[in-house]
Image (cartoon, grey):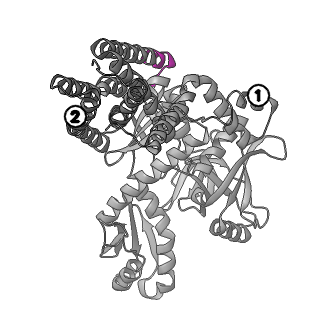
Amino acid sequence: MLQIDLWKRVLIWLVCVTGLLLALPNGFYTRVEQANDAAAEIIAKGETPERLEIAGQWPDYLPSSLVNLGLDLRGGAHLLAEVQVEDVYAARMDALWPEVRDVLRPERATVGSFRRQQAPEGEIRLKISKPEGMARALELVRGLASPITSLTGAGANDIEVSGADDIITVQLSEAEKLASNDRTVRQSLEIIRRRIDEVGTREPTIQRQGADRILIQVPGIGSASELKALIGTTAQLTFNPVVGRGSDPDASAGVGNKVVPSIDEPGTYYTIEAAPVVTGEELVDAQPSFDQNGRPAVNFRFNTSGARKFGDYTAENIGAPFAIVLDDEVISAPVIQSHIPGGSGIITGNFTIEESTNLAILLRAGALPAGLDFLEERTIGPELGQDSIDAGKIATVVAFVAVLVFMALSYGLFGIFANVALILNVALIFGFLSLIGATLTLPGIAGIVLTVGMAVDANVLIFERIREELKAGRGPAKAIDEGYSKALSAILDANITTFITAVILFAMGSGPVRGFAITLGMGILTSVFTAIFVTRLMIVMWFERRRPKAIEV
């Protein structure tokens, strides 16, 4: 009756040993973390004696995955950013204007001359000199429309074109605005993630909240202002034709142009064409370097499309100034000396080494499609995180010891078996969290503490059932077997309902709630495993060795 096949015994102990090995690095957290960082630096930057020494602090043959500490445990920065999705509308219209101009030029005999007029942001208005050609002009401009590919905008076009008297108006359709908003937030999310990953921070939380907001939590970073400096710049690099130069910031730029300040020359303002020749979206690489005078600079390289446009423009405009514009500020405006094929070049300016490095990081990660408005920012110091860890340790140890003492006093030797299973249970939880690279937060510690209390619940049900069988006159072997069999349904019912709750919390919650749900759900699985299999196996092995005539539970 109390027989467990050899392969099942081996499998049970194998799971326990694997869990202990995976959890082991967390007992040497600082040493393993430093070794992992050194190993990553060796891969990225090459070997040095110092890196090799630090990497050797932890043996290669042992697991090295750790449970990542969340913001409330490690300290770091918290930001809630709102994406200014409307910024994209104006950029889309500025980019569309050259296409509108090019499609109407061959039809001047029909539509007459045309000129762009002042219009609200996100619109193009142009006046034609022959109103009788309005139908043809509308037909040509509407031909620039593209179908929307999103599910919400299926069947609609991206632009709406209307005409009245001699004015043509072009603007984004409502369906395209909705699709554009979603794309903008998704792009911002991905670019923020790339920028943060570039500086090597550990396990940041970057997730969308609502329609146009992004939550950013980065453990281990110095302050919220440092994080804002990293991600708050749009890093929108463009190469624009120069129309003029002066010292008046309020000078009339003319339709289709704009006035922007110069970084290198304070008090100097450039009038440039709003539609760029090439944008930073066509960059494939940017690296910090030095110019011919030994000053910090940034080397860049375009993709095939950008290289062709860049080469064609420089070939056709030798002797003309060409502005390199970053976030509506002219970094430099060199005169084109010759045709520049190949699509590569260098950005010079009054950079420090740190500024050129940061600019290269921002350009490599890509430009944010829209500006960010930071609605909430917090800096959590590492000392507060350490206080949280200490409080969590105390709570866990108190709960752990109380449960161990209670089980030992209540159930004697069987209670000790349950205590060993409880220790294995916690090790399995940490082993699994390390395996999946989960982030442990303060609510996650609460989930572990709750699991410690719940872990013995299954054993209590089993042991009480064994007591009842003994009182009914069953022999030791029969009582143990019946106790496990009859308690199984109650154990599964209780734990399945709690596990469903954990799944709902994970699906519907975010951040700390998910951390709690993960540790609670994982704790339920390991608790059932240790109660039904591990404790039973220990009891069976003891029973086979001792063969008692009577037992006390």
State the residue position of label 1.
Answer: 53
Of residues 55 and 466, the one nearer the viewer is: 466
- 379 in magenta: yes
Residue 231 appears left or right of 513: right
User: x%, y% of residue 17?
Assistant: 52, 34
State the residue position of label 2.
Answer: 487
Residue farthest toward the left in the current orientation of the protein:
472
Q: Main secondary structure of the magenta part?
A: helix
Residue 202 appears left or right of 266: left
Q: Which residues are magenta?
A: 378-388
Could you classify mark 2 by the number of other residues whose Cα lies within 10 Å: few (under 14), some (14-19), or many (20 or more)?
A: many
Residue type at tag 1 = Glu
What residue is at 64 percent from the left and 43 percent from the top? 359
Of residues 381 and 270, the one nearer the viewer is: 381
Label 2: element kind: helix
Q: Quadrant of residue 240?
A: bottom right
Q: Quadrant of residue 534?
A: top left
Residue type at tag 2 = Ala
Which circle, 1 or 2, is nearer the viewer? Answer: 2
Question: Is residue 352 shown to the viewer in this render?
Answer: no
User: x%, y% of residue 519?
Assistant: 37, 33
Q: Which mark is residue 182?
A: none
Chain-order first, disc 1 or disc 2? 1
Label 1: element kind: helix
What residue is at 41 percent from the left and 51 percent from the top? 185
Between the residue at mark 1 and the residue at mark 2, the CA separation in whole angstroms equals 54 Å
Q: Quadrant of residue 487?
A: top left
User: x%, y% of residue 535?
Assistant: 37, 29
Residue farthest toward the front in the current orientation of the protein:
549
The reply to whether callout 1 and callout 2 are in contact (CB within 8 Å) is: no
- 382 in magenta: yes
